[in-house]
Amino acid sequence: MCKDFLRGIEDGQRRMVFKSWESLCRPRKEGGVDIKEILSWNKAHMMGWIKKLESAAPNIWVQWVNAYILKSVSFWNFHITAAHSWFWGNIITCRDHLISFTGGIQQAKQLLLTPEYKGMVYEGLRNKWPVLPYHRTLGDSLNIPKHSFIGLLAAENSLPTVDNLCKRGMVLVNRCALCESAAETAAHLFFDCPFYTEVWSQVSSRLQVPFQASLS
């Protein structure tokens, strides 16, 4: 394990983080599991309708919008009223987000010409979080997903260890189930438990890989 990951687990002991849906909808490098943030992802896909209008695609919907809604008014300068539908209001809202994200109408038009415009818009709309220093360790393509997820929970101090369960209000005796000699925390289970140390010392010796038995 890299030193940044070990430091992450050590820092995690200073706070208790219970994973929320919002925290899962982040890239792996920001502590999530790459689930798309649905509101931002939906807005990014709504840009497809704007691209059709901008490119004057030869389909019935574009022709109908130009004839009955825009009526010779530029889409980029069009203002909605109470008479317009909910769907059309969302289109205009997405247009305003696109202009704000890119910095102007011309920049927005240029972005729509890019094949990857949906991904770029999504990155501009979604909430950003600090990049975890140990994300390369957890996000390696050779990792088993289950192991990466457990490692993430450990680094964020979100594993259901006895100390975290006690903080949730459960009345439990905070003792390690393996050695029964210390409080059960993530740091203890992964690094300081004598039982753990003995097992992984044997494993690391046979595999001939370095093993760190303590955070200190």
Image (cartoon, rainbow, N blue to C red):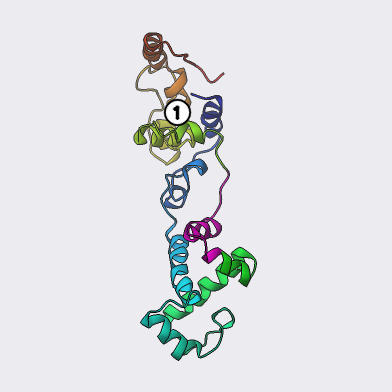
Relative to 30, say whether 182 is above or below. above
Left or right of 61 in this view: 110: right
Percent x, y of residue 76: 57, 78
**Taking the image as drawn, is residue 160 in sight?**
no
Percent x, y of residue 205: 40, 8
Relative to 200, say whether 106 is above or below. below
> Quadrant location of residue 159?
top left
Percent x, y of residue 173: 39, 28
Q: Locate the C terminus and report the quarter of the image it occupies.
A: top right
> Quadrant location of residue 125?
bottom right
> Is 60 or 50 nearer to us in this picture?
60
Residue at (47, 42) in percent of width and height:
28
Left or right of 120 in this view: 172: left
The extreme front residue here reads: 58
Q: Is residue 55 magenta?
A: no
Residue at (52, 88) in percent of width and height:
81
The residue that disc 1 covers is 186
> Is 43 or 213 nearer to us in this picture?
43
Q: Residues within 10 Å of mark 1 (few under 14, many from 20)?
A: many
Relative to 206, say whether 142 is above or below. below
Percent x, y of residue 185: 45, 28
Relative to 15, say whether 81 is above or below. below
Residue at (45, 63) in percent of width and height:
39
> Is 96 or 168 nearer to us in this picture?
96
> Is 3 or 48 nearer to us in this picture?
48
Left or right of 177 in this view: 47: right
Tag 1: residue type?
Ala
Question: Which stretch appears magenta?
Answer: 111-130
Q: Is residue 121 magenta?
A: yes
Residue at (55, 63) in percent of width and height:
111
Determine whether the residue tagged by mark 1 lies in a helix, strand or loop: helix
**Taking the image as drawn, is residue 78 in sight?**
yes
